Amino acid sequence: MLTGFITILLLIAFLSAILYDRLVVKNRKIDAVFGNPERANGGYHWVLAGSCSILLLWLYFSWDIARSYYPQSANELCQVAKVRESVLGINYIFPIDQRTLKSTDFIERETKKINLLKIEINNADLNIKDKTQLLSFLTKSQLMIVALSDEKNLKKETQSKIDLVAEKLSSLTLRFQSDNFPEEKSTEEKEKRKKLLENQTDWGATGMEIPPYPVTKRGEKFESASIEMNVIVEEFFQIKNDHKKFIDLSLNLKNELKEFKNKLTESQTLEKDYLRKISKISGRISRSNIFPSKSLDSVERAVKEFDETQKVEQGNLRVIDTFLFPAGTIVASGETCSEQGAGRWLPKPTDTLRIFLDLLKPSVGYKNFPMLWYQFIGFNEVIDFIVPDWIADLLPGEYPVHSSNGEIEPNFKKHALNIVSGEFDSFKIPVPSGHIWDSFLRVFLGLSLGVIAGVPLGLFMGLSRFAKGYFDPVIELYRPVPPLAWAPLIITVFGIDNSGKVFLLFMVSFAIMIVSARAGASGTQLSKIHAAHSLGASKWQILRQVIFPNSLPEILTGIRVSIGVCWGTLVAAEFLAGTTGIGFVENVARKYMQYEHIWITIFVMGMLGLLFDLAMRWVIARTIPWRGKG
Amino acid sequence: MSDLVSKNLNMLFGDTVHALKDVSFTLKKGELLTVLGPSGCGKTTLLNIIAGFLNPTSGTISLDEKEINGPGVERGMVFQQGALFEWLTVSQNVDFGLRMRKENPQKSKKLVDEWLEIVGLQGFGDTPTYQLSGGMQQRVALARCLINNPDLILMDEPLGALDALTREKMQSLVLKIWKETGKTIVLITHSVEEALLLGERLFVMAPRPGRIHKEYTLPFASMGLQKDLRSIKNNKKFVTTREEILTMIWDMEEEIMGKEN
Ligand SMILES: Nc1ncnc2c1ncn2[C@@H]1O[C@H](COP(=O)(O)OP(=O)(O)OP(=O)(O)O)[C@@H](O)[C@H]1O
Ligand SMILES: [Mg+2]
């Protein structure tokens, strides 16, 4: 219901944005000349229109609009799909979905093969006797086709069986149209049905399943029809065109083939080869169950009639199917039904939102780890993490040794060690945790380390012959390698958790920062450096006051690029290994085909990337407003 | 005697561009030299060598009998294009030199205000320089150089981007500073009138190879200290010299064209 309301709201917003634009265009006196970037300023109503159309497309192609306006439609379409499935086999025989009758098609194909084989055998290097023999087998195969095609050969009994099926079909068609189809069920059956319906969930509740048991009158009708249809179709396929003439021909040929085969010697491989081909053809013809073309007319008529009727009986369901289930539909397979097409891989926004909200609950999370929450960590653990233990080693004195009665007297150095290694009681502080936080932290740490190390080195390389020459080979060699190519090595060395990933991201951002800082440093206008020199600045001052600020635009752009690349690398790295992080969530969701979860992770990544970028834009606007204006 | 002495300066860019050829001159302390010449005749190159940004291919140049190698605070330069630090405000630009030499900030501030007033930019102290007009930027550059009180002031077309009125004011300003401080000034210009008005001495340079073509000693600068600049422009000698130099430069340009065709 809510979705339906939102859909209308979105539609109205979209249309009013367009109307508003018409109004603005009409009232605007002068626009900037074409090519002036000012023409692209403003236009926030188009932002609204764009967002609305994305949401509408999502609602539409995920079939959420169908669900909100016709909540039962999927269930009904499931019953229709069951009917479609039941007639699938019989339809296949007739030129309904196919171009030609199945028997005709079969005869055409086999005749072509026989003729080709005849020519081949004629030209083959065989003795005359074998050749004529082989050719006669083929002729006999053709005779079998003739025998099957001839109406005169058809047994009276077979024809009446066929007509009976046609009659049953017609009667089903007739009953199907009536209002009191299906007939009353027994109380026992009703009870059973009621139980099934009680346990049945709503459409989409479990992700993608369609409730399979009919809940509407129309649905029941189709379901009953499909059950009866299955029986009739089964019966039809039992009918065989097995008159005496054909059976005789078939047996005869089989025996002759066997005889001929037994006479062949080891070395007659060519003959054997041909014989095998002929046996295959004759076998196929024996099993083909070809009927004379006219004999199935009654069934064909009945099937077509049923198909027409079932389409009519669908009523508005067909319209709903065409317009509200774009790019796919609902298909049945036995008792169950599923979405096939857009609705399958594009989850419905409402489901997605619900699952997202569920995931955000710290008690639920994903794989026993919240998406974004906090946890309490002892301050000592933080100290342990930040301060390296070897600091204690640097202090004067020795660590205590055990005395003769086996006691250890802690001294100052031991106390210091206890502190830096976090072995003390302390208060607890809240620290963020969760998949999203972990990913964020990895990017942040990797990026920061890359910037801290890369910018000075890059500037140095832009200014010093030694640095450029000395570090160039290493950096230029590792930089072009796709970061993921390093991943297996780095994960082995640094472990699958944070340090490996942070190091990988460090490598990525380090290279980018070096390149951009170097470009910034070597791109400094000479006159500015000259000016600084003649104003009495020292080398360090020139670096700090002129070259660094002058390279800031390049450095910040480098950071922006790094963020993008780091994100990409991180998610891929989390795909490879690890137990937390957004990429990990997506990888697991992929394994279980949880399309909602996949889309949620994609969305979260997009939002985080956007957030990073907005932050960078903010920083850029504040720190280098002069860019492009100097 | 703090003279600027140049002996047989040669400057080659690569093997083919002979930017300066055998440039020798002596500039006494307190003289105001203007340099004229067609575009590309090596004026900026000469100035860069004096400032110490470039090492001449051969020849020597010295100030106060000390050979110039490398830039120094005693030689201030105003560049052809502002070369301001666009990440700093106007006053931060002006006191850049003072800050680099860690002068007393209070004193610096007073000095900056003074100089901003001299160049007519009072009230613009906190404006970022990228928001200034071209002429205003040039005035900031002037103040940034002069505030350091250099012995030798080098100016590369400092007034090129200014409007006629401001330009005249700045010309008076240059003359005033020159008179009051007695500094040695080398000023490059494209305007013959400006060269004549400001120059106590005047070099006309010729291109390919860049060399001093003709040298004048002029009285107008000292006249300009007393008189209105515009009246000097009607002085008979001023007019004839101007025409002479203009013809000279025209001939040079024509010769270049001829060479190229
Ligand atoms: N760094 C350089 N490398 C190569 N050639 C240079 C370089 N700097 C200047 N030149 C050349 O030296 C010659 C003199 O240049 P310079 O900049 O001194 O001319 P200019 O007299 O200042 O011209 P303008 O009046 O246009 O500023 C020119 O031909 C120029 O092409
Ligand atoms: Mg120049």
Image: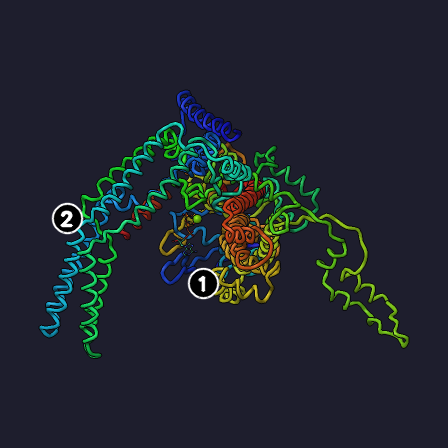
Left or right of A529 on screen, residue A119: left
Relative height, residue A167 to residue A461 (above, below): above
Residue closest to the eye, A383 or A370? A370
Left or right of A370 on screen, residue A257: left
Q: Position of residue A491 (x, y in %)?
A: 57, 63
Question: Can residue A580 be seen?
Answer: yes
Name, please, the residue furthest toward the top: A27
Name the amino acid, label 2.
Lys
Residue hosting label 2: A152
Within-10-Å neighbours for mark 1: few <14, some 14–19, many 20+: few
Front position among marks 1 and 2: 2
Q: Secondary structure at mark 1?
A: loop
Residue hosting label 1: B57
Residue at 50%, 52% (x, y): give it: A590
Name, please, the residue furthest toward the front: A157
Chain to which the residue tagged by mark 2 belongs: A
- Residues flagged by tags 1 and 2 on a common chain: no
Residue at 53%, 57% (x, y): give it: A573
Chain to which the residue tagged by mark 1 belongs: B
The answer to whether mark 1 and mark 2 are in CB contact below 8 A is no
Name the quadrant containing residue A219. top left
Within-10-Å neighbours for mark 2: few <14, some 14–19, many 20+: few
Name the amino acid, label 1.
Thr
Identify the image's colour scheme: rainbow, by chain, secondary structure or one colour: rainbow
Name the quadrant containing residue B127. top right
Residue at 30%, 48% (x, y): give it: A237
Q: Position of residue B222 (x, y in %)?
A: 52, 40
Residue closest to the eye, A473 or B51? A473
Residue at 52%, 29% (x, y): give it: A1
